[in-house]
Amino acid sequence: DVKVTQSSRYLVKRTGEKVFLECVQDMDHENMFWYRQDPGLGLRLIYFSYDVKMKEKGDIPEGYSVSREKKERFSLILESASTNQTSMYLCASSLGDPWGEQYFGPGTRLTVT
Amino acid sequence: QQQVKQSPQSLIVQKGGISIINCAYENTAFDYFPWYQQFPGKGPALLIAIRPDVSEKKEGRFTISFNKSAKQFSLHIMDSQPGDSATYFCAAISGNTPLVFGKGTRLSVIA
């Protein structure tokens, strides 16, 4: 079974702090994704990566950056956390084909106070 | 044109009934249409998917119906059970591009 793990289930940070969310997958998937999930807004793509050291902006990249130094690990960075970044963050991975068959981690609920 | 519109937002179905969730899209380049199921406190999980060369796909109690000319697809859950209570997301994708998700339907199956 594919396993996608996220470093924390719950996280509370203060406004202005730098926040790191880590995601690791164990199935040698090329593609990795970061989403945020908010009530009524569904899943919104922040960034994705189709190869090591490659990254592409999704629909809502502002205020976020990412890092992919190793194939299995994809990190989401909030350079200066703000209260409007309070959300559920979901990481996913997929093989090369189809991209649509994604495996999600359990999510990190981030609260910024 | 990249949107996938999903309805209803929420749905309450009696145990044993049929749950139907609908999605519509505009981009005719979409070539893969998955449905994801998400239980509270968990990440979404792929439930069933269809490609546009077939009109229906069935896996157990779950069926996707696909209408290419109308650019619509739907999820039917037969004999709905309380354990099916979850949020369901339809999605669409075109080749090697990110998934486009619908906004989700919260299904409650009551006994």
Image: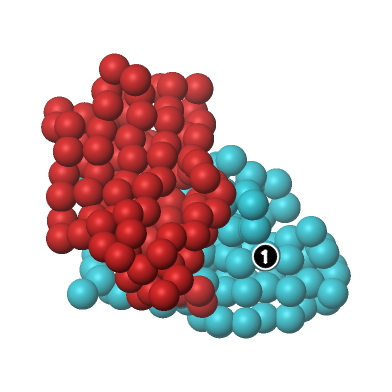
Chain colours: A cyan, B red
> Residue B41: where, in percent of width, then height?
51, 77
Which quarter shows the C terminus of chain B?
Answer: bottom left
Left or right of A37 in this view: B74 = left
Q: Amino acid at mark 1?
A: Ser
* Residue at 46% across, 44% down: B101
- Residue toward you, A102 or B39: B39
* Residue at 25% across, 71% down: A2
* Residue at 30% across, 49% down: B76
Left or right of B17 in this view: B86 = right
In the rendered structure, the residue with mark 1 lies on which chain? Answer: A
- Residue toward you, B39 or A48: B39
**Would you name the residue on which mark 1 appears?**
A87
Can residue A101 be seen by looking at this rendering?
Answer: no
- Residue toward you, B65 or B46: B65
* Residue at 40% across, 46% down: B21
Residue at the top extreme, as displayed: B69
A32 versus A8 height, above or below = above
- Residue toward you, B69 or A5: B69
> Mark 1 falls on what kind of element?
strand
Mark 1 is surrounded, within 10 Å at the Cα level, by few (under 14), some (14 to 19) or many (20 or more) other residues, namely some
> Residue A43: where, in percent of width, then height?
54, 52
> Residue A70: where, in percent of width, then height?
38, 65
> Residue B63: where, in percent of width, then height?
22, 49
Can residue B56 be seen by looking at this rendering?
Answer: yes
A76 versus A56 height, above or below = below
A79 versus A99 height, above or below = below
